[in-house]
Image: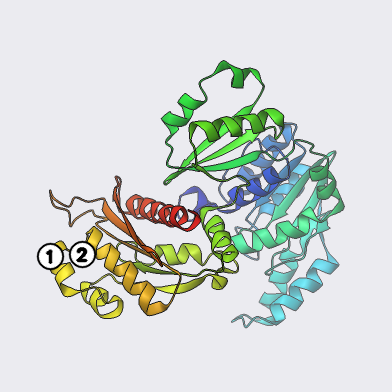
């Protein structure tokens, strides 16, 4: 990934993770990633170092475009020992795209920008530009360099075109590594998992087991996906009964959505301390409208009373952060919005607002359904963002447990 703004932390590198995940899912082993600044020397050094590592594929994102600091294509050409040529098909595509965008620039400036972006290493395959900057697939001897634009949506759209090219498709199909088993486990922490794996048998079998701790979950990758790998999965089922909620890498919200769709059920949310984070997370899923009706962000007590119907005496006697209020929020949301299930959450995310009786990190979750309401108290630690993220995940897990029985 190129970009001074990424290196300095002003922009998050989404591209590296997305491309690595896609390659891994196709059995391609990713051996490293790097972030460098926008100077051509830094880009050349990073590409040269990657190629020297005897890898089959190097993917470079960012640094394509009309500005003075868009130097990636020139850097890749220099490393490959190839001149830059104006690609006529790329130029036509860029002109067509730019003609549909209102720009405050003269015709001469627009044409200069188009011609700069149409330069690719000689013999390279130019990729259709999702925006105005086309990527390219460049052969460097037996190795391949794929150059992609930096904005995440452009990068991944261009990557789709790249993997459809003969050269990249053949590389992926010939990887032969096989995708790993991907398991997601709820309610298990890393020390518990390490203890479960503390048997020389698993290490002697040649398994590669990776564990990634996420808020409220563990993500496991097991290679290879064979009889031994599946026997470890069965072992984990025995040690942690009911904890594996995803066996194909599906995210929590995907698992939950599939369960609701399978049962013809719907969901609404009532959020306080998370401020709509649960609803936002659910609606990232394509097709969420089939099972998620919507939600209420009831940050203030007046909204809890007026929109969700939380009784005033509940708020007065137990407080906004209480099991009673979480229960009333869920029941009010379910009744007023007409869903099968309602999920509520209320708590103290901090850094202020806590008391000895109700400290920062105290969160209550409620799930209301046809047979009644379930509540759960959470005691979470960390800064405000971590508390909110963990609260969202653990609330969704409570809902999953209740919905799936």
Disc 2 crowd rating (10 Å Cα; few below 14, some 14-19, many 20+) is many
Would residue 121 be visible to someone looking at this image? yes
Residue 63: horizontal and vertical position, in percent?
A: 63, 56
* Residue 97 higher or lower than 211, as above or below: below
Would residue 81 be visible to someone looking at this image? no
Q: Quadrant of residue 339?
A: bottom left
Q: Say how the picture is coloured.
A: rainbow
Residue displayed at 33% across by 70% down: 331
* Residue 2 higher or lower than 265, as above or below: above
Q: Which mark is residue 221?
A: none
Q: Quadrant of residue 201?
A: top right
**Residue matched to label 2:** 320
On the rendered structure, is 205 left or right of 404? Answer: right
Between residue 160 and residue 224, name the one nearer to us: 224
Q: Secondary structure at mark 2?
A: loop
Between residue 106 and residue 90, name the one nearer to us: 90
Q: Which mark is residue 317?
A: 1
On the rendered structure, is 298 left or right of 64? Answer: left
Q: Secondary structure at mark 1?
A: helix
């Amino acid at each position: 990934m190129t970009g001074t703004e990424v290196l300095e932390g002003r922009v998050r590198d989404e591209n590296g993770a997305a491309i690595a995940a896609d390659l891994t899912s196709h059995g391609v082993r990713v051996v490293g990633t790097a972030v460098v600044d926008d100077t051509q020397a830094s880009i050349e050094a990073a590409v040269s170092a990657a190629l020297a590592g005897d890898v089959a594929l190097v993917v470079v994102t960012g640094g394509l475009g009309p500005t003075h600091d868009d130097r990636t294509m020139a850097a890749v050409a220099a490393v490959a020992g190839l001149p830059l040529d104006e690609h006529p098909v790329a130029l036509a595509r860029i002109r067509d795209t730019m003609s549909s965008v209102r720009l405050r620039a003269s015709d001469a400036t627009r044409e200069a920008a188009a011609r700069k972006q149409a330069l690719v290493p000689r013999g390279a395959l130019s990729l259709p530009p999702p925006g105005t900057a086309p990527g390219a697939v460049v052969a460097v001897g037996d190795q391949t360099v794929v150059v992609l634009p930096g904005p995440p949506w452009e990068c991944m759209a261009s990557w789709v075109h790249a993997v459809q090219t003969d050269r990249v498709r053949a590389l992926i199909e010939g990887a032969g590594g096989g995708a790993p088993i991907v398991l997601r486990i709820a309610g298990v922490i890393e020390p518990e998992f390490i203890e479960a794996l503390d048997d020389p048998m698993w290490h002697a079998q040649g398994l590669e087991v990776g564990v990634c701790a996420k808020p409220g979950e563990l993500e496991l990758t097991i290679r290879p996906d064979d009889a031994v790998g599946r026997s470890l999965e069965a072992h984990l089922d025995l040690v942690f009964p009911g904890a594996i909620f995803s066996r194909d890498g599906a995210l929590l919200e995907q698992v939950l959505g599939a369960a609701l769709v399978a049962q013809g059920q719907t969901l609404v949310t009532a959020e306080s301390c998370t401020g709509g984070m649960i609803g936002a997370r659910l609606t990232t899923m394509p097709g969420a409208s089939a099972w998620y009706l919507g939600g209420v962000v009831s940050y203030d007590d007046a909204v809890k009373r007026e929109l969700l119907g939380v009784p005033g005496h509940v708020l007065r006697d137990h407080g906004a952060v209480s099991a009673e209020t979480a229960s009333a929020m869920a029941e009010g949301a379910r009744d007023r919005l007409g869903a099968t299930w309602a999920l509520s959450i209320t708590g103290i995310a901090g850094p202020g607002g806590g008391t000895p009786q109700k400290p920062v990190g105290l969160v209550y979750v409620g799930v209301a359904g046809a047979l009644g309401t379930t509540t759960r108290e959470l005691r979470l630690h960390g800064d405000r963002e971590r508390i909110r993220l963990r609260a969202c995940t653990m609330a969704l897990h409570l809902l999953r447990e209740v919905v799936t029985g």
